[in-house]
Amino acid sequence: SFANVVGEWSAKNGRGALPTLDLILDFGSGWGRITRVLLSRGVHPRHILAADVDQDMTALVNVTLPGITALTVEPMPPTFLNDATLDLVTAYSVFSHLSPEAHEAWAQEFGRLVADGGLVVLTALDRAFFEQIQWSVDSAKTPDATPAAKSLAGAFADLAAATATFDQGGIAYAGTGGDGVRTGDFYGWAAASKQYIEDAWGAAGFDIVEWVPSGVLFQQAAVALRRRPRSA
C-alpha cells in the first residue's frame, strides 16, 4: 500500500519509522483513506493532521476518526501551521490534479512547513497518462464507450501539444474541475514531468530522493522529496 511505501522510504531516508514521527500531514486527505492506514500502522492520532479543501470531507474525518485533527484549507496557501513543524507529508493522487500555480504554491508552502530532512511523498501522473488519454479518445468513438472514457478523452483539446509540453520538461494541465469546491482554476488533470517536479520542488528547498514510474508500485509515479537544511 501507499502507506507501506511511505514508511519504507521514511526509514530508508533517515526520517525513521512512521510511529516515531512527531507530526505527519495527510494532504488532500478526502475521507481519510490514507489517514486510516497511518493509524493502522501504529501512528498515534495526535501525531497526524489531515487537510483538504472540502469541508464536508474534513468534517467526516473529524467525526469518524476521533483524535485526528482535520483542517479545511483554501485551494492556495498559506496555512496557519508553524514553520518547520512537519516530519512528513503524504499526498496520494493530489498533485496529479493541481494546476501549475497551485502545485508550485504548495511546494513553496511545504518548503516552509517541513523540517530539515523531512519528506514529502506524493504521486504524479507521468508520460503513461497520455497513452491512457489516447486510449480514451479511441474508445470514446465506439458505441459502448464508458462515461469515464468520454470524460478523459475530452480533457485536453490538443493532446499532441500537451504531450510536447510534458516531453519538454513541463507540466500539462487541463482545468476540467471536479465536484463541489474543486473548480477548474486549480483542479483538473495534471501530468508533471520529472524535470518539472525537480525544478518546482528544488526551488522550494527539496531534492528528489525516490522516483518510481507509474505501473510499478501504483497507477501513478511515486515520488519522495527531502527538505534540504536551511541556511544558518
Image: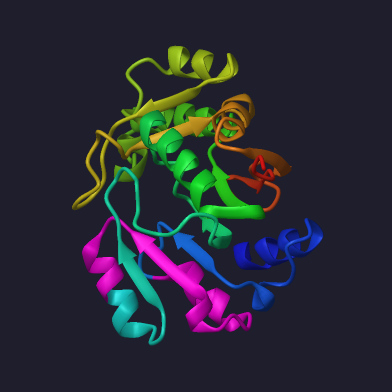
Q: How many marks?
A: 0
- Residue at x 55% of width, y 61% of height: 86
Residue 125's place in the image compared with 13, above or below, is: above
Residue 71's place in the image compared with 116, above or below, is: below
Q: Is residue 58 left or right of residue 212?
A: left
Q: Is residue 170 left or right of residue 58?
A: right
Q: Is residue 146 magenta?
A: no
Q: Quadrant of the N terminus?
A: bottom right
Q: Nearer the viewer, residue 206 or 149?
A: 206
Residue 229 position, x and y percent, is 69, 45
Residue 58's place in the image compared with 95, above or below, is: below
Q: Which residue occupies the extreme left position in the image?
A: 180
- Residue at x 57% of width, y 30% of height: 203
From which residue to which does the magenta span run?
Answer: 32-59
Q: Is residue 143 left or right of residue 20?
A: left
Residue 24 position, x and y percent, is 54, 67
Q: Quadrant of the C terminus?
A: top right
Residue 122 position, x and y percent, is 56, 49
